[in-house]
Amino acid sequence: MTFSITRRGLLIGSAAGLGAFGLTGCDDVVQNPNVQSVLDMAETLTMKSQRLLVPKDKLAREYSEADISPTFRPNGTSQPDSEAYAQMMATGFADWRLKIDGLVERPVELSLADLKKLPSRTQITRHDCVEGWSAIGKWTGAQLGPLLQSVGLKPQARYAVFYCADQLELTLDGSGTYYESIDLIDAFHPQTILAYQMNGKDLEVAHGAPLRLRVERQLGYKHAKYLMRIEMKDSFAGLWGGKGGFWEDRGYEWYAGI
């Protein structure tokens, strides 16, 4: 739809324009008030437009095997720089567990094997980075919505918050740890999956092994990698900068729909 095209062009144009302020790419902080004003307007317009005009279960475009990109750049971190992650990687993530807690009736911890036993979805979709590049990949994983239903969401749950293994800044309060969040509309979208395979193979470390989020109707920085925990919350209160994500706390917009 027209507003989606305009949205993507606006975001990419804003990111490209950051160079004028000494800021470029996904790993930079949007601090200039003029840039922030543009992004805030785009976020408000797009979220209202998409939620009003687009059915909540409408799928992002899916592609054929022939469309898969020959190269797919890693977005964000290429490997978490922590001893704990290195130890998990050395054992093929045999000891890794995904914790799901917060506003749920039945908190759980799931191994990679547990997740692979769940009904899976495979989708070939385009990844759009705010830096301006795109690539098409094939993703397989467990659908998030049914998994959340299985743990029993409490009535006040509104957001799924994803905590990751990578820390982009060394901070005592943990605010340098990568995290992201989505609301229940996106959490229960059919294409929102916890992906453990890319292009028919287990995820490589650079692409988020052992598990990453795929939320196909949003830009790449929302697709959190190296997942460790999902917490169901009613608000972002008490979450570091209070904006619902690592980059959002530093000026990016929370709703990155395309």
Image: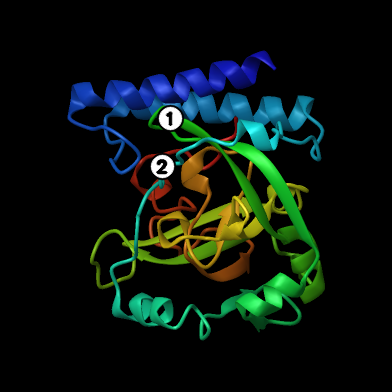
| Res 232 → quadrant | bottom right
Q: Which mark is residue 133?
A: 1
Q: Which of pointers 2 and 1 lies earlier in the amino acid sequence?
A: 2
Crowding at label 2, few (<14), some or many (≥20) Cα neighbours within 10 Å?
some
Can you give x and y, in whole percent of width and height, for residue 17 in the image? 30, 21
Quarter of the image with the N terminus in it: top right
| Res 166 → quadrant | bottom left
How far apart in space, not on screen, are marks 2 and 1 (Cα)?
9 Å
Q: Residue drawn at (61%, 26%), measured in percent from left and top? A: 46
Which structural element holds mark 2? loop
| Left or right: where 82 falls relative to 144 | left
Q: Does residue 17 show up?
A: yes
Q: Residue drawn at (62%, 65%), measured in percent from left and top? A: 233
- Asked if disc 2 and disc 1 are in contact, CB closer than 8 Å, the reply is yes
Quarter of the image with the C terminus in it: top right
Q: Does residue 235 show up?
A: no
| Res 205 → quadrant | bottom left
Disc 2 designates what residue?
A: 73
Q: Is residue 141 above or below residue 30?
A: below
Can you give x and y, in whole percent of width and height, for residue 117 in the image? 76, 74
Can you give x and y, in whole percent of width and height, for residue 240 in the image? 39, 61
Q: Residue drawn at (52%, 68%), measured in percent from left and top? A: 210
User: Which residue in the rendered view is the most extreme toward the bottom?
Assistant: 95
Please state which amino acid type lies under the numbered disc 2: Arg
Task: Compare residues 232 and 224 and report the one nearer the observer.
Answer: 224
Q: Is residue 223 above or below residue 15?
A: below
Task: Compare residues 151 and 127 and report the one nearer the observer.
Answer: 127
Which structural element holds mark 1? loop
Please state which amino acid type lies under the numbered disc 1: Trp
| Left or right: where 144 falls relative to 236 | right
| Left or right: where 61 falls relative to 244 | right
